[in-house]
Image (cartoon, rainbow, N blue to C red):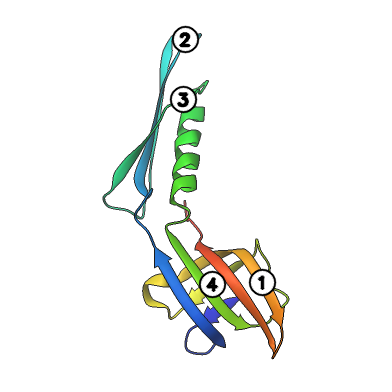
């Protein structure tokens, strides 16, 4: 489903961005005792030009595992960077786990995962959505 700020029936909209616990890249360095090797993995967020580096010290058994861990940990840390609360007229298709697209919201345009959907029937049928930006990497 796509929400266009100009044409969709949006009742309320608020967005929040944070820089706390947001990283540009993640690095894994693990000295494996059994293999007597040092496994290193690094992953950079392709959408960021600057920022902090997340240092990870977790056990890995291969170079590939170190690279996968770096990417997964970076995604986990950065997933709450942009969150949105949106209220609209009710639609049973708006369920947690689904993805919606926002258009004409300027810097908030893009794909968002529905983390929480609260359907309310009162004066009318409305749904309140908690969204977070889908990460493209």
Q: Are the two marked residues, 4 and 1, in contact with CB atoms closer than 8 angstroms?
A: no
- The residue pinned by badge 2 equals 33
Q: Are the two marked residues, 3 and 4, in contact with CB atoms closer than 8 angstroms?
A: no
Between 108 and 124, the one lying in front of the other is 124
Between 12 and 52, the one lying in front of the other is 12
Determine the CA span between mark 1 and mark 3. Answer: 43 Å
Q: Where is residue 125 drawn, in percent x and y?
A: 70, 85
Query: Residue 65, relative to residue 10: is it above or below?
Result: above
| Mark found first going from the N terminus, 3 or 4 | 3
> Residue drawn 52% across and 90% down?
7
Between marks 1 and 2 in the image, the one whose residue lies nearer the viewer = 1
The residue sitting at the left extreme is 50
Bin the neighbour count of mark 2 within 10 Å (Cα to Cα): few under 14, some 14-19, many 20 and up.
few
Between marks 1 and 3 in the image, the one whose residue lies nearer the viewer = 1
Q: Are the two marked residues, 4 and 2, in contact with CB atoms closer than 8 angstroms?
A: no
Query: Residue 47, relative to residue 36: is it above or below?
Result: below
Determine the CA span between mark 4 and mark 2. Answer: 47 Å
| Mark found first going from the N terminus, 1 or 3 | 3
| Mark found first going from the N terminus, 2 or 3 | 2
Determine the CA span between mark 4 and mark 1. Answer: 18 Å
> Residue drawn 36% across and 47% down?
23
Q: Mark on residue 101?
A: 4
Where disc 3 sits, the SS reads helix
Bin the neighbour count of mark 3 within 10 Å (Cα to Cα): few under 14, some 14-19, many 20 and up.
some
Between marks 2 and 3 in the image, the one whose residue lies nearer the viewer = 2
Determine the CA span between mark 1 and mark 2. Answer: 50 Å
Determine the CA span between mark 3 and mark 4. Answer: 36 Å
- The residue pinned by badge 1 equals 118
- The residue pinned by badge 3 equals 63
Q: Where is residue 132 drawn, in percent x and y?
A: 51, 62
């Amino acid at each position: 489903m796509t929400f266009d700020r100009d044409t969709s029936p949006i009742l309320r909209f608020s967005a929040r961005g944070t820089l706390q616990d947001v990283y540009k890249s993640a690095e894994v360095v693990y000295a494996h005792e059994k293999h007597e090797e040092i496994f290193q993995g690094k992953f950079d967020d392709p959408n960021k030009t600057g920022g902090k580096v997340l240092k990870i010290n977790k056990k890995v058994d291969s170079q590939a595992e170190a690279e996968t861990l770096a990417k997964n940990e970076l995604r986990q840390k950065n997933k709450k960077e942009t969150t949105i609360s949106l209220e609209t007229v009710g639609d049973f298709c708006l369920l947690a786990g689904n993805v919606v697209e926002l258009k004409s919201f300027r810097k908030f345009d893009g794909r968002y995962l529905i983390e929480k959907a609260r359907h309310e029937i009162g004066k009318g049928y409305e749904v309140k959505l908690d969204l977070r930006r889908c990460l493209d990497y």
